[in-house]
Structures are given as structure tokens and as C-alpha cells.
Image (cartoon, rainbow, N blue to C red):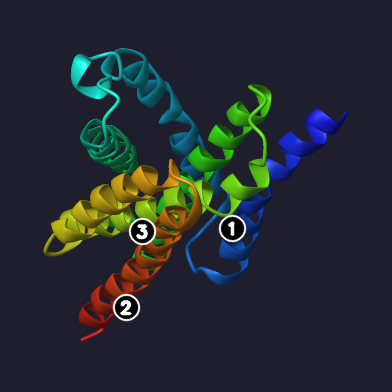
């Protein structure tokens, strides 16, 4: 019973985000909430597949700090964010307003993060509540940045820098998340920077749209 309760808790961030978006975001519907969540869940499949094969390559298994950095930037950063970004292309960006699309992108990232947390619960990973306030939020913020790129790519002048930022920050987050002590705090800095950058870019794009 405790296992099922913990698994249910893992979905709280997703449920809260969907509920708030349905009330606050014009154009955001239950159908979009479902589609966005499914896109986030779908990302688990290719990410898991690539993780099984790519992380076995020699460059990722040297046991050095440089190998860890390469792994986090290439796999956690580039590959994971690229897959998440590709799936966002399935959303009808040209038929959606900017704010609703961003909400969908963030919810997609939350769905991925929450389902990933459940996998960790099943495998017996402790302190799952820490992941809900770190990895899950990071997935959401980076998905938001990728969403900014996808929407601008389809509707205005593409903001590729938003996607590049998502790749780098996700990689940096995972690099420092593997440490303990003071170095681990840099992973929190990466999360905060991702949130701030997503918010700043959103307001900059929204301001240009309203001119």
C-alpha cells in the first residue's frame, strides 16, 4: 500500500500543473493536457532504449570526471532534450496561442519527470521526494525552453538559443546532481537558472508578439 501511495505522490506536480493551466491559461483544454502528458510519457521509450546502448560505449565508461561531463552533456542534455523537443513538434503550434503551447510543453516535461520518478520508486531508489523538487522541475523547465524554440520555429523567428540553453543546463544539472555536499548545490543553481531563463524568454517573445 505504501508503494502505491508513493507512486501516486509522484504525479502530484503533474496534476497541479494541469489543474492550474485549465483555470489560468486561455486555450488550454483537457484534450491538450492529455496529449501533452502522453508525449511526455512517450519520451521515456526512446530515452530508455538509447540509454541501454549508448551508455555502454567506452567514452561513457572511463570512470573519470571528464567522462561524466561528456555523458551528462551528450546524453542527459542533448539526446534527452532533443527527443523531448521532437515530440513537441506533434503539437499543433500554428493553431495554438503562445501561452497554451508553453503550458503544454511544461506539462509534457512534468509527465516525463513524474513517470521517471515512479520508475525510481519501483526500483527502490530512496528519497524520491528530492527528485520531485529537483529532477522533475528540471525536466519541466527544460521542456519549457524547448517549447519556446518549437513555437517560435513554427510561428515567428526561431529562438534556437532557448533549446541550446535547455541542453546545456540539463547536462550541467545532471553532472552536479551526482556529487554530494557543496558541489550538489550547483545542480540547484542550474534548476533556478533554467526557470528564470524560461520566464525571461517567454516574456521577451510575448512582448514582441504584442507589438
Q: Earlier in the sequence, mark 2 or mark 1?
A: 1
Secondary structure under tag 3 reads loop
The answer to whether residue 98 is above or below residue 135 is: below
- Residue 174 in sight: yes
Name the image quarter holding the N terminus: top right
Give the spatial CA distance, label 3 vs label 2: 17 Å
Q: Which residue is mark 2?
A: 203
Give the spatial CA distance, label 1 vs label 3: 18 Å
Q: Nearer the viewer, residue 50 or 105?
A: 50
Secondary structure under tag 2 reads helix
Name the image quarter holding the C terminus: bottom left
Q: Which mark is residue 96?
A: 3
Q: Earlier in the sequence, mark 1 or mark 3?
A: 1
Q: Which residue is mark 1?
A: 17
Q: Residues within 10 Å of mark 3 (few under 14, many from 20)?
A: some
User: Percent position (x, y) of residue 144?
Assistant: 37, 57
Q: Residues within 10 Å of mark 1 (few under 14, many from 20)?
A: some
Q: Earlier in the sequence, mark 3 or mark 2?
A: 3
Residue drawn at (54%, 55%), measured in percent from left and top? Answer: 29
Tell which tag, 3 or 2, sits nearer the viewer.
Answer: 2
Which residue sits furthest left?
157
On screen, residue 165 versus residue 105, left or right, reads: left
The answer to which image quadrant residue 158 occupies is bottom left
Amino acid at each position: 500500500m505504501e508503494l502505491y501511495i508513493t507512486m501516486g505522490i509522484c504525479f502530484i506536480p503533474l496534476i497541479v500543473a494541469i489543474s492550474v493551466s485549465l483555470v489560468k491559461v486561455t486555450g488550454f483544454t483537457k484534450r491538450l493536457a492529455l496529449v501533452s502528458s502522453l508525449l511526455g510519457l512517450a519520451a521515456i521509450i526512446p530515452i530508455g532504449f538509447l540509454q541501454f546502448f549508448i551508455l555502454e560505449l567506452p567514452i561513457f565508461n572511463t570512470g573519470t570526471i571528464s567522462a561524466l561531463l561528456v555523458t551528462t552533456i551528450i546524453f542527459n542534455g542533448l539526446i534527452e532534450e532533443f527527443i523531448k523537443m521532437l515530440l513537441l513538434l506533434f503539437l499543433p503550434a500554428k493553431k495554438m496561442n503562445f501561452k497554451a503551447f508553453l503550458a503544454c510543453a511544461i506539462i509534457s516535461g512534468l509527465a516525463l519527470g513524474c513517470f521517471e520518478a515512479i520508475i525510481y520508486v519501483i526500483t527502490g531508489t530512496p528519497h524520491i521526494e528530492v527528485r520531485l523538487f529537483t529532477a522533475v522541475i528540471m525536466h519541466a523547465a527544460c521542456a519549457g525552453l524547448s517549447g519556446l524554440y518549437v513555437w517560435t520555429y513554427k510561428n515567428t523567428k526561431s529562438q534556437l538559443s532557448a533549446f541550446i540553453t535547455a541542453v546545456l543546463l540539463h547536462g550541467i544539472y545532471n553532472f552536479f546532481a551526482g556529487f554530494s555536499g557543496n558541489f550538489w548545490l550547483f545542480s540547484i543553481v542550474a534548476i533556478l537558472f533554467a526557470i528564470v531563463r524560461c520566464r525571461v524568454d517567454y516574456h521577451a517573445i510575448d512582448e514582441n508578439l504584442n507589438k
